[in-house]
Image (spheres, rainbow, N blue to C red):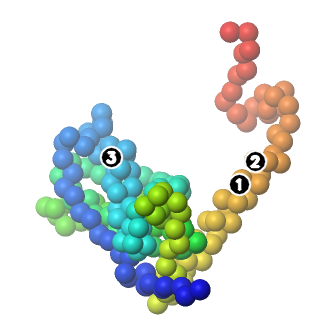
Amino acid sequence: MNIEYKTVDSSKITISELMLPSHTNFSGKIHGGYILSLMDQIAFACGSKFSGNYCVTASVDTVNFLKPVEVGELLTMKASVNFVGNSSMIIGIRVEAENIQTGVIKHCNSSYFTMVAKDKEGKNVAVPGLILTTLKEVSRFENGIRQIALKKEREYQKTIATFGSIENILKSNEYKVRVDFEQ
């Protein structure tokens, strides 16, 4: 079998968008759901560009909103393929907001989207192999391996986890919970 390989650079996408008042939440900051939607779009574009196929979102790992995004800021998202499996790719996304008047740029979010390449019938299709050309790319690939191992471990733990009785949970005073079956 002849495997095609592509560089990380061949997957890179950058998208910028001016943040408008229509994108705000009730506190006047840019709505996190709107930013997530933009992140999903860039993950799709990155995965599709790299694989040459339509892609779907399989999972989103660790979305931390580090700093709020303000109206009038220029939101820039940078994405690249960090890891490839058979039909899946882990896309790393960095979100930055720039105050256009001052030029100050702040890191607002980083996340990892797992995208799966699909053929015209909707079946999983193989993605190219990944050529790593820098130590940073190697580090990101290794991080992808760790992410997959942690996912597998979490799934395994769900099958064996026993937390004891509800009485033990209630006695612990560690959790803010009340059980009231009578209501």
Distance from disc 1 to disc 2, alpha carbons, whole Å, reads 6 Å
Q: In the visual, does 69 lie left or right of 71? A: right
Q: Is residue 70 above or below residue 134?
A: above
Q: Which residue is mark 2?
A: 158
Distance from disc 3 to disc 1, alpha carbons, whole Å, reads 29 Å
Contact between marks 3 and 1 (CB within 8 A): the answer is no
Q: Residue furthest left?
A: 101
Q: Is residue 177 above or below residue 111?
A: above
Q: Is residue 98 above or below residue 5?
A: above
Any part of residue 95 in sight: no
Q: Residue furthest bottom?
A: 133
Check disc 2 and give the amino acid type: Lys
Q: Which residue is mark 3?
A: 34
Q: Quadrant of the N terminus?
A: bottom right
**Helix or strand or loop: what does disc 3 sit on?**
helix
The local crowd at label 1, few if under 14, some if 14 to 19, many if 20 or more residues have their Cα within 10 Å, is few
The mark that comes first in sequence, 3 or 1, is 3
The local crowd at label 3, few if under 14, some if 14 to 19, many if 20 or more residues have their Cα within 10 Å, is few
Q: Position of residue 119 (x, y in %)?
A: 46, 64
Any part of residue 164 in sight: yes
Q: Residue at x 26, y 59 (%)?
A: 75
Q: In the visual, does 64 lie left or right of 174? A: left
Q: Residue furthest top?
A: 183
Check disc 3 and give the amino acid type: Tyr
Q: Which residue is mark 1?
A: 154
Q: Position of residue 45 (x, y in %)?
A: 35, 65
Q: Quadrant of the C terminus?
A: top right
Q: Residue furthest front?
A: 121
Contact between marks 1 and 2 (CB within 8 A): the answer is yes
Q: Residue at x 21, y 51 (%)?
A: 19
Q: Residue at x 60, y 77 (%)?
A: 142
